Amino acid sequence: GLLTDADEFGIRYAMVYQNVGLWGDAVSSLESIRKRTDSKETLEHHFYATVLLFDILSALNSRYISSVASRLESMIARIKARYRAAVYYQVFGEFLRTKDHLGEAVSALKKARELYAGIGYNDDLARTDLVVATIRIEQGEFDEARDIIDRVGAQIGAMESSNVRGHYLLIELLYRQSVSTSKTDLFRWISRCEEIMSHVTEMNLSMKLNATLFRVLVRVGEVGRGLEYFHRYYSQVKKIVSGLQRDDLVDDFSNSPEFLGLVDEYRKATKSGPG
């Protein structure tokens, strides 16, 4: 019906808002859709809108994440579309990783992987694998991380999404830095990340690439070059904050460990704070 079509259209618009950094508009759109679709007939749209909202709130370090997570967990058994269930397990796994519940995160991501594999969504399968690889890097399980990265790398050439390629290059760079690879090898992957930047269309991924390039370049002594990427990251943060429309979300994002950690590293590199 018209309602369902309008809500699907609204969800797609919210995804565009998310990708370009208009997270305040995305939150408003998704919350409006959720209010209209909390019924049996529109449960799929309600669920997917809630998953997207959960993803954005996680990136904002929002105080409301736990309540939205509980809502999702109560709905997951009633969702028929395997793709929507897979997206839930993927974003929930990424959220658990940020909370250092790594075992639970991997379990959720493996559920997502099984669902994606069953329906042939190779791009999403690769994204899920790369999150697991990130967890293995954080755990110091470098051999397992290498196996996963190689598996994705063998397929990356056939994937059309520049965002998936960007995610793959980001994890390759994180891995190379973590295993103390040669400077020559590290700079090769830095250059590949720099080359993909102009093709990345997802704000969150672009921010991660900018933040990682800043950190890696500063650590190898390329401070000036690294600071350029911090300034790009900081401009993205300011764009998001300016459009949030709510003080509570601004406060949560401004106090997120990722943001505060990067600002601290910037201060150490420059002996001052960002402008």
Image (cartoon, rainbow, N blue to C red):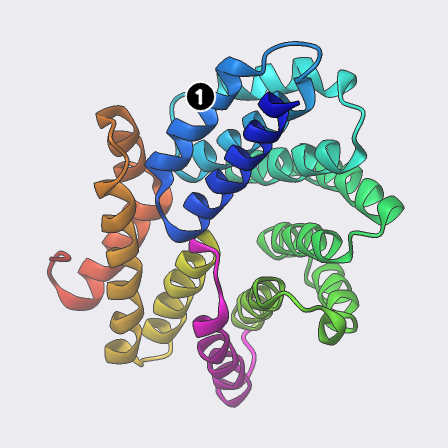
40 and 212: which is toward the camera: 40
Give, as a single range, the part of the protein colored magenta. 180-203
The location of residue 271, given as percent across then percent down, is: 12, 63
Residue located 48% across and 56% down the image: 202
The answer to whether residue 116 is left or right of residue 202 is right
Please tell me how crowded label 1 is: few (under 14), some (14-19), or many (20+) other residues with Cα within 10 Å: some
Residue located 55% across and 36% down the image: 9
Residue located 74% across and 64% down the image: 143
Q: Residue furthest top?
A: 39
Q: Residue type at mark 1? A: Ser
The location of residue 179, given as percent across then percent down, is: 58, 70
Residue 97 visible from this viewpoint: yes
Residue ID for mark 1: 32
7 and 85: which is toward the camera: 7
Q: Quadrant of the N terminus?
A: top right
The location of residue 130, given as percent across then percent down, is: 66, 56
Q: Is residue 191 highlighted in magenta?
A: yes
Q: Residue furthest bottom?
A: 184
Snapshot quadrant of residue 148:
bottom right
Q: Secondary structure at mark 1?
A: helix
